[in-house]
Image: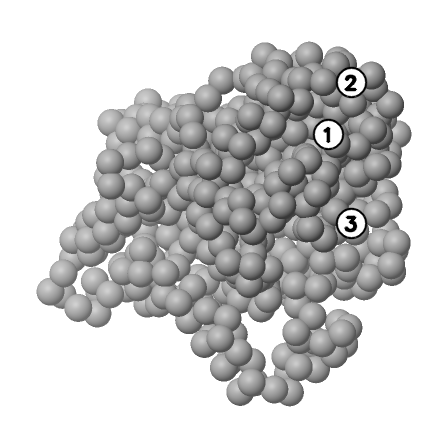
Amino acid sequence: MIAKHFRKLGVMISTPANRWRWWVGIAILVFFFVFLLLGLSRYWGHMSSINDLGQFDQAIWGGLHGVPFLNTINRSQQVNWLSLHFQPILFFFTPLYAISPSVIWLTIAQAFALSLAALPIFLLASRIFASEKAGLLWALAYLVNPFLLNAAAWDFHPITLAVPFVAISMLSIESKNFRLLFLCCLVILSCKEHLGVMVIGFGLLWWIKNKRWKSAICLIFLGVVHTVLVFKIIMPALSPTGEHLLQGRYSWLGNSQQEALNTLFTQPIYLVKKVMLEMGGASYLFVLLIFLLGFPLAAPEYLLPGLADLITNMLSEVSMPRSLFGYHSVCLVPLLTVAALYGVERISRWNKKFSAKELARFAVIAIFIEGYFFSPLPLPGAYNYWAPVHFPNLPDPIIHKIRSVVGEEASVSAQANIGAHFSQRREIYRYPNKMGEVDAIILRLESPTIKINNLSEDQIKKQLRYTLDTLDSHLQMDRAEYIVSIERLLSGKEYGILIWSDPWLILGRDVEDYEPHKQIEKKLNQLRKEWQINSSDYNGFWGKSPFSILN
C-alpha cells in the first residue's frame, strides 16, 4: 500500500538509489541518532519535566491499568488527559507499553518522526527542481532548522508525530494524490486539538494548487467538524469543569469561547497591537522567516496549513509557545521549508540574476549557520539553551531501587525534573503539591543545568514558566522555597527518611527516621552557595522559615 503511493509520487523503489539518495538516507539516519541522543540524555540527565514527559507516560500507562489517559500531576483531582489536550494518538503506544512500559518508546518515536520528515521534503524538492542534489540541500535545510533541533531536545510531545505527515501532505498536494493527503490528515487530527484548522488549510491549498473543489470541500468539512466536535463536545464532556482546562492561556481574549471569538472578530486593531507589539508576535514571525532568508513569503499560500499553529502560538498569553527553544512551532518547520523552496523557484523565474540553485545555496548556508549557533548541543560557540550538567548521560541505577522501596501503589509527590521516572502510578503529583497527603516524597538535591540564574521575585511570578533554562523552572518553584520546604519536612515528624544517597532524598510517611540530618543539612548548605541563595533573605534554621508557599 505504502509502496504504491510512493510510486505515484515518482519514487522508483525498485531502482537502486544514486549517490544523492544515499546521502539523504545517511543524513536522516545521523539526525535520528542525534535526536535520540538528545531525548535520552535529557531523560537520563534529570532534565525532563513531569509536566511534559511525565504526563504522557502516566496517560499511556493508565490505559494498561483500566484508567485510559490518566492524569493527576498538576490537578487536585484525577482528570482525563484528553480534556487537557486532545491527543488520541497516544493510544497507539499502549501495545508498546504492554511489551515494555518505558518512555524510551516515546523518545524513539519522536526522533524517528522528526528525522523521517526529511524524506518527503527531499522528494518534493527533487521534483520541483528536477534535481536530487537540490532535494538533498532542502532536506538538510529542514533538518538543521533551530526550531526543529530544539523541539527534539525538549522531551516528547505528540505533536511532533504529525511532522512527517505534514511533509507528506505537501508532497501529496504537489503530486495530486488526494487519497494519501486524506490519510495523512486523519493522523494529523489525532495529534492535537487545534489541528483541525491545519486540515482546513490543507483543503484550501489543495483547491488553490489543483483546482479540485469537491475534494477541497471534503477536507475543509473534515477540519471544521473535527474542530467543533473536539472543542464543543469531546473536551468539555471529559473535563470536570465542563470546559477546556487550558483555556486560561487565552483568557485575555474573554472569559468564554464566545467572548474570545467576539474579541477576535470585532477588535482587530486592539488585537494587532496586543499580539504583534506587546506579546512579541512580530519578533516571533521575524525569527520564523529569517532562518530561511524570508523566502517563504514568496509563496505564502503554502503557509496556509500553518495558520493553526501560528494562531495558537501568537494568541497565547504564555510566551513559551513563541520561543525559539520550544516545541510549539515544530509543525511549522516543514511548511516553512516547503514554502521557501517554492519561493526560491518562483523568485528565480521572476529575477534571472540568481538561479534557483544559487538562492537555495544561500538559504541552506544561512540556516546551517543559525542551526549551529542555536543548537541544543555543547558545541563551541553554540547557545546550548538547556546546558545540561552532563551530556550525554546514562541511566541512574538507583532509580530502580527507589521504585522498589517506594512501591508501585504508593502515592507520590515528585520533584518536577525527576517526576517522569516515577509517573507510572495512579497518583503522582508535582512537588510540593499534596505534601502531607501522599505516601512518599521523591527529591534530588542537585541542579540538572549549569545555568543557575537568579530571578527577582517579580520575574519568578511572571517568567518562571517561560524562562525554561533556569534552575527555578526545572524545579518548578523558587530555589530558596525549595530548600526551605526540605528543611520543614525534615524538622517535622510526618515523614521519615527512606533513602538518602546523595543527591537522592526519599521520604516516606510514618517511617522510622535513621536521622542522617547532618549530612543532608551539609548538602543543603552546599546548594545555598552553589545556587547563590542569600541566607539573609530568610531564617535558614530547621523549621523556622518565613516562606509562605508551604503554609
The image position of residue 341, as x and y in percent, is 32, 55
Q: Which mark is residue 373?
A: none
Q: Quadrant of residue 259?
A: bottom right
Is 178 drawn above or below residue 397 in the view shown?
below
Which of marks 3 and 1 precedes in the sequence?
1
Secondary structure category for the residue under label 3: loop
Residue denoted by label 1: 490
Residue 227 versus residue 311: which sits nearer the camera?
311
Residue 72 versus residue 117: which sits nearer the camera?
72
Which of marks 1 and 2 precedes in the sequence?
1
**C-alpha span from label 1 to label 3:** 15 Å
For the residue marked with disc 1, what is the amino acid? Leu
2 and 3 marks in contact (CB < 8 Å): no
Residue denoted by label 2: 513
Is 244 drawn above or below residue 149 in the view shown?
below
Which of marks 3 and 2 precedes in the sequence?
2
Secondary structure category for the residue under label 2: loop
The image position of residue 254, as x and y in percent, is 72, 76
For the residue marked with disc 3, what is the amino acid? Asn
Is 411 drawn above or below residue 541 in the view shown?
above
The colour scheme applied to this rendered structure is: one colour
**C-alpha span from label 2 to label 3:** 23 Å
Secondary structure category for the residue under label 1: helix
Residue denoted by label 3: 551
Measuring 87% from the left and 23% from the top, which residue is drawn there?
510
